[in-house]
Amino acid sequence: MGTMSASAPRRVLLAAPRGYCAGVDRAVIAVEQALKQYGPPIYVRHEIVHNKFVVQTLEKKGAIFVEQTEEVPKGEIVIFSAHGVAPVVHEEAERGKLATIDATCPLVTKVHKEAIRFAKDDYDILLIGHEGHEEVVGTSGEAPDHIQLVDGPKDVADVEVRDESKVVWLSQTTLSVDETMETVDALKEKFPQLISPPSDDICYATQNRQTAIKQVAADADLVLVVGSKNSSNSARMVEVAVNAGATAGYLVDNAGEIEESWLEGVTTVGLSSGASVPDVLVQEVLEWLEERGFGDVEIVQPMQESIQFSLPKELRRDLRAEAADKVRDSA
Ligand code: 0JX
Ligand code: SF4
């Protein structure tokens, strides 16, 4: 046995697609572009994306991250994060005479629009998502009187609606596809007339990253997903991997967080990263693994991705002048 395990081939199955999605790429470039066009400071409401490294890198370039709109000084520029904001946040920015750049992912905006439309038709909207997550706070804020949150199958028993013939479910964009289907099945059992969103709310990037890591996980003893702890889509990838047969799975911000003991008895490591993660962090994990005998890297790529979004429209305007005008008008 000793000689066998010593000579057992060690390999890495590297999942693709992984890392940056189109919405993250757009949001991060928006902050960089604003810093270049207007100069620091540029305020960002909430982490632009849920990744420590991205936030720290932008801070060094002059971005200032705040949680409340009121923390931004009058007349300054504020960027809204990829996760989206409730309409009240736009009102807060207006009151504070701020110039805004909205980096909400277009696929999150799509869900906001669905919520507005169904609320207008007086539906009860069951929003599947994680309590307190920035995105569901934003989406719920579009129609607080019509939306109730369903945080997984465990919540279904308590759901009550006004009219069972007018109920629709919507969801956060970054959930586990499988768990969401469980929740939907349970909701349908309770409300047979429940209707589904006009198109998938769980976005293409979330779905593709889960499909790829599932394929990897089936053959992996250990799955590592690079991502920050507060990143919903990254955390779901670990869950999906473990459910798909990986013996163990961990979410790490970077190579420094990997523990040597996780490699004991492991011959195949599966590796991927969340939608908010720069690939340099994955490359560092690959180097860390190579130093420990895992230099053989095989790419597992069930599909290609090519989607791209254009930058927020506000970046094509003169925001400093606009903000100055607002402050002057209010004086
Ligand atoms: O926590 P999330 O997965 O929603 O956000 P993160 O990690 O910033 O991912 C990119 C932004 C996703 C918005 O849908
Ligand atoms: Fe947009 Fe999906 Fe990326 Fe979120 S994970 S920013 S919804 S593409």
Image (tube, helix red, strand yellow):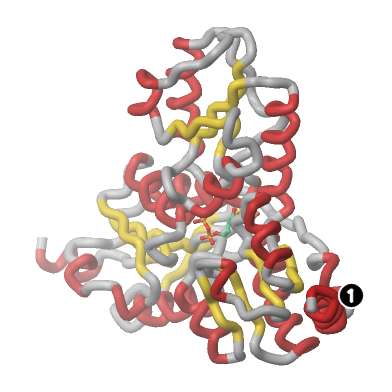
User: Relative to residue 49, is residue 208 depicted above or below?
Assistant: above
> What residue occupies the far left of the structure in this picture?
2
Residue at screen point 50% across, 68% down: 67
57 on left or right of 151: right
> What residue occupies the far right of the structure in this picture?
317
Instruction: Judge the density around disc 1: few (<14), some (14-19), many (≥20) Cα neighbours within 10 Å.
Output: few
Residue 38: x and y, percent?
77, 88
Question: In the structure shown, which secondary structural element does the residue marked by tag 1 occupy?
Answer: loop
Residue situated in front as seen by the camera: 66 or 19: 66
327 on left or right of 186: right
The residue that label 1 is drawn on is 317
Residue 61: x and y, percent?
60, 90
Residue at screen point 43% across, 26% down: 182
Amino acid, disc 1:
Arg
User: Relative to residue 93, is residue 73 depicted above or below?
Assistant: below
Residue at screen point 41% across, 81% down: 287
Rendered-image quadrant of the N terminus? bottom left
Residue 289: x and y, percent?
35, 76
249 on left or right of 56: left
Residue 141: x and y, percent?
60, 44
Residue at screen point 42% across, 71% down: 296
Residue situated in front as seen by the camera: 25 or 120: 120
User: Relative to residue 27, is residue 211 depicted above or below?
Assistant: above
